[in-house]
Structures are given as structure tokens and as C-alpha cells.
Image (cartoon, coloured by chain):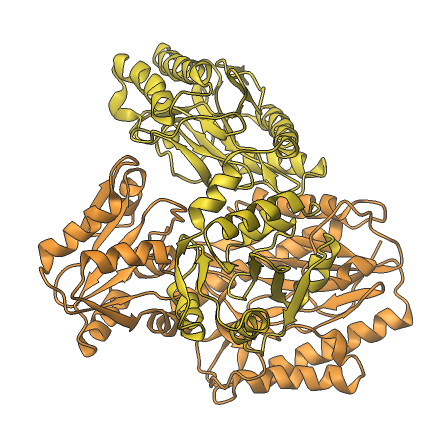
Chain colours: A yellow, B orange
Amino acid sequence: MTKMNENRLNKLRQILNQNGLDFAYISDFKTIQYLTGFGSNPYERILAMVVFSDQDPFIFAPALEVEVVKSVGWPYGLYGYQDNEDGLQMIYDHIKERIAQPKKAAVEKDNLTLSRFYPLQTAFPETDFSFDLTPVIERLRLIKESDEIEKLKQAGHDADLAFEAGFKALKAGKSELQIAAELEYATKSRNVPEMSFGTLVQTAEHAADPHGETSSLPLKNNALVLFDLGTVYKGYISDASRTVALGTPSDHMREVHQIVLEAQLAAQAAVKPGKTAAEIDKTARDIIEKAGFGQYFIHRLGHGMGMSEHEFPSIMQGNDLVLEPGMCFSIEPGIYIPNDLGVRIEDCVYVTKDGCEPFTHMSKKLQQFG
Amino acid sequence: MTKMNENRLNKLRQILNQNGLDFAYISDFKTIQYLTGFGSNPYERILAMVVFSDQDPFIFAPALEVEVVKSVGWPYGLYGYQDNEDGLQMIYDHIKERIAQPKKAAVEKDNLTLSRFYPLQTAFPETDFSFDLTPVIERLRLIKESDEIEKLKQAGHDADLAFEAGFKALKAGKSELQIAAELEYATKSRNVPEMSFGTLVQTAEHAADPHGETSSLPLKNNALVLFDLGTVYKGYISDASRTVALGTPSDHMREVHQIVLEAQLAAQAAVKPGKTAAEIDKTARDIIEKAGFGQYFIHRLGHGMGMSEHEFPSIMQGNDLVLEPGMCFSIEPGIYIPNDLGVRIEDCVYVTKDGCEPFTHMSKKLQQFG
């Protein structure tokens, strides 16, 4: 848990005032984490934060989270509810205590479900809920502040050490799961609290499935092994991929790896303020297409990242978003040839005033082990 | 991935017919997993399944998932989309190819967000979307079939072995994270693909926070250690808690542990068809209250489980749901005394025709280590 950030809350209040909004109903726990430092997935329980244009905000949380919210230094309203209480009605009552008849309010349309929105609308039948808070929050989160970059750097450092542990574990005959287990054990033993997602280790042709899972398949000798991993540091993540060789790679393996590497390096070198997300994607895609492997690069070049690996900006064709300093995203071209092999190389980067810097520094060359 | 289950799809088709529904728009990937065997979280990408009352269903998935859907033996319509395509519009077109003017359709209100629902409503302005599919799916998933129970038993067995590994790792001075790392390493080395959630290890007074996290705190001697863990087997989970002693526990620790154990055993013994969820909660709660610790039992007794630990039925006050054979849920009373200690003992069980059986069998007595 990190301490709350009053600056972000002030920015949101400004936006409410500029748009004549009485309050914002925040339902996404990641948004609450961004604004307050308190981050906890409530699952089916109710967690909400209500920010008013001209009054103090409040957090409404399951009773067992109340002490945790206090521990981040939250200085405003805080209400808990027990599992057997009608949490939604309690939230509406707390809003009405402050504003009897709100005219206009914002909700997070990418997060709010129908079963949570309809009762809100029923409780405030005169309120206009058409304002979508999602793009506002996305925009706030899009440009990382320096303290966020520092956390992402630390997470990247942990990812580099995780690669080292994984590479050291490589041995033909061991299962993909065994390698992942050794890698995660070494990482967590260094007090990294959690991986940002289940470590992916894929051998040989299994790596041709870019959404496959780490399995009990044994590692093959003279084949490639693809690693995709991430760690969490104070609520911020790392995410990186490397493809290495176990034994001696064939010329074909070397060629495919080299093309992906060139695409990755070219895209990373192309990043700077003023370029669009689509241009960066095209830089990598052109190289892979010219080499004749275009049909095997079947996903976008990258995704935004920060508190999760599912943020903006999306680095893909059609996205004309202009890059700015502080944006953070992955650059991860791949070539996946069914029944043959898969290669992906990924660094996440942050945009600087004249280029970008990666969060991970593990060598991207075709390293050989075993 | 497990193979698809035509029987479940047929049940859903029946419900559509009984309610005059032209189609069901399924947006929750867990529902798709339940109906098809294909389970993958799409995050910000679009994954949907459309089931018609009198035509074959289709799945609409990101391009990189298409091969995976085929691999579960999905025999019906299957469409992929690239990241730069307008996936939502493509789904609507596929629906319109089959039914030009649907009158009534069902959506999952607990899952569908406003930003995914409004475009659907706009594409089908004449269609009545008021039917909520969420309770229908919950009801289907509530009663586990025998093949689901078998998977849950295997996951429970893996959890028992995980406890063993964790207990073996216990040593004063090691951090909570180190114990969790050793436990998870041993578990994954046995080819368990993933934990169902990050393993919780909490020492001494840290365990008084029932929603705290595994930390770098060192284990204390002559103190309690709380474990909460789970594994995944073919899409089904385990979830269990044990509280054990490192060194010699005080009389106070023994007393609190004994009360929680009695509450857990009494609730488990009370489970049988015909009882309500609230009655089972009360059985445990009464014991803890009579012992004078009622104020420290601050959560519901249990939650439903199966494909995740966030299912129905909720075992809590106010839930008059009548238990039936095949229902699966946790029984996890706890006593959390701030700045002192925390004890939780949890087994997940399935209801049989005259009682219940736990999925985990690790001893619940106060075991001593170190």
C-alpha cells in the first residue's frame, strides 16, 4: 500500500467542476487505488468511492477493509458494511446526506455493471448519469508521475533478476512448470510479494500459441524457450518477454529470433513524443512483413501498463494517439509459426522528452543455455 | 482446458425457449468456460458467446484465442477478430445474420458493463434486454455435477499437500513471504499449474487482519501462523485455511483456536439438504458469541466455490437459500483480535444427500512445529 495522493484527487475535483458534475461514483478498485493508495479487489462485495465537486469524498468498503483504508492515511469519510447489510442502499443514503438532489453525476462506464448501475439510477431518478468517467481516469493514469516511474523501474529490476533465475534453471527434460516454479521461488525469496501474472514458460512449438499456458511439457534440447513474466512492486508491475535457446538453435530459429529482435529494437528506437501509437506498431510490423513473416505476427505491438498490464495506450494499427512523456507501454513483437516455434521479445518503456527508456535490461540477444 | 459439455448448453437453450428469449448475450468468460470448456480472461479485449433459442450458438474471440477454442472441440460457429477491427460491430452483424429483428434477449447484468451494453442496445433498438441471465447461470453453476466434484476433490488433495510443504518450511525468523514461496514452489513442482490466489501466510498479530497480505515480517516463535491457500485443477479450485503454532502456544492461543475449531466442526456437521445457508452461519456464530468472541468474527461464515472462490451460495446471516446436494462452499469461521492474534480454520465442502464432505483433509487440530 502506498500513501494517498491528494494531487490526483484535486485533478478529479477540477474535472467535476469544469463539467458541472455534482459527484463521481467510482466503482473500479484500480481507480480507487490510483486516487487513494488503497488497493483491494472486492470481488462480489461492494467497494465504492464517491468524490464530490465541492465537499469531501468518502470511501465505502467491506467492514474487513476499513482498517486497511485507515492505514493508508485516508483523511476523509469512511464507511464500512457487514456482509448481511444492504451496502448499495447505504451508499445512496450517504450521498443523499450530502446532496439531496444531484443534477449530474459521472460513472465509470467501462467498469460499472448493469446490476450496480440500475439501482443507482433508481435511487437518483432525476440525476443525469450520461457523463463517462472512464476516459477521464484513463487520461489521468496515462501520464505517469515520477514516483510511478520509480516504482516501475524497481519492478523492472525484479523482472531482470527473475529472468536470471529462470535461465539458470533451464535443463532439457524439466517441465515448463518446473522452470516457472524455480523462477518464481527465487523471485519471491527475494521478498517480491507477487508476480503480476502467472509466469509463462513455453518450449519449442508450444511457444507458437501466444496465449497458451505453462504446461507439464518437458523442455526440448536444441529448441527455443519463451519466457513472459512480471512482478509487482508497491502496486506497480513489470512485464517482459525473452526467447532463449536451450542447446544449439537451428539457422531457422536464429533467423526468426533475429527478425523479431530487429523489429523490437526498431520500434523502441522510434518511440518519441509526437509519434503516434500506430506509427510505432507499423515500424515493427513492416520489418516482420518485409522478412516474409507478417502472417505470423497476430497481435498488436503493445499495451499500456502501470498499475496493471491492461492500461492505455494500446500500441496498434488505427490508434492515432500521440505519444507524450510519461506514457508507459510494452513493445512486444512476435512471430508464431504453428507446429514450429514461437518468438516474442518484450520490454516495457516510458516515454521521455526525446525518446524512451526500458524498465527491463536483460539482454535481448539470442542467449544459449544448457 | 476441459471438453465442452453439451448438456449445460441444452439446459440454457431450454431456459431461453421457456422465457421467449431469442438469444442470450454472454459476456462473462467464466460462464463461457462453464458452457464450453474454453476459459480465458480477455481483459480489455472482447470475448462473447451468443446462444440462440433455436439455432446454433457462436463464440466471438480475439484472433489469438481461436485455435484454443477449436482445441476444446467446439463444434459451432467461431469468429475471430484482430485488435484493429471493430469487434462489437462484428458481433452485432453475426447476430443479425441469424435473426434480423430479435424481440427479447438476455444479458448477464452482474457482468455486462455500461460501455458494452449501450452499443448492443443501440444496435438492436427494438429488442427487450430486461431479462437478467446472471441468476440463471448462477443457478446452473450452483449445483455441481459429479465430474465437477471429482475435479474439486483433486484440487483439495493438492491443497492438503501444499499445507504439508508450508508446515515443513516453518522456522522462526523466516519471512511470511519465504514460507509462501517454499509452499508454492513445492506445489508447482508437483505440476499444479497455478494457485487459485496468492498464498496467505500471516504470523502472530499480523493474522488479526483477515484481509492482510503475506509480508516480509519474520515468523515469531511461540506464536500462531495462519495459512490460507488454494490450487487449480482443470479449471476448478481449492481453498482452505489452517492456523498452526510455531513453538509453544500460550493458553490464550489454545483457547481461541479451540473455539474456532468447535465452530468450524459444528457448522460442518450441521450441513445437510433442507438447512438454510443462514442456519449454518448461525451454528458457527453462536459458538463464537457464547465464548465471548463474537465481536471478533467480522465476516460471513463462507462463500460458494467451484470454478472460482467467488460463487454462490453465500453462507451468511439473511441468506435463506435452502441447501441441496451438489452445492459447494467454504466453512471458515475466524477470530481476529487486533494487536493480538488471528485464527481461521476453513474447509470447503460439497453437500451430499444426508450431510456434506470436505475437499481438504489436513488435520484441523492445533498442530505444533519448530
Q: Find residue B118 and report its horizontal and vertical position in percent.
A: 29, 57
Q: Find residue B174 and report its horizontal and vertical position in percent.
A: 81, 44
In the image, B42 versus A366, the foreground residue is: B42
Vertical arrangement, residue A233 with respect to residue B57, above or below? above
Drawn side of residue B55 relative to residue A228, left or right: left
Vertical arrangement, residue A70 with respect to residue A249, above or below? below
Vertical arrangement, residue B153 with respect to residue B287, above or below? above
In the image, B36 versus A8, the foreground residue is: A8
Q: Find residue A250 and report its horizontal and vertical position in percent.
A: 38, 12
* Residue at the outermost bottom position: B274
Drawn side of residue A79 relative to residue B311, left or right: right
Vertical arrangement, residue B198 with respect to residue B102, above or below? above
Q: Quadrant of residue A126?
A: bottom left
Q: Quadrant of residue A233?
A: top right
Rendered residue at 36%/28% (across/down): A205
Drawn side of residue A52 relative to residue A75, left or right: left
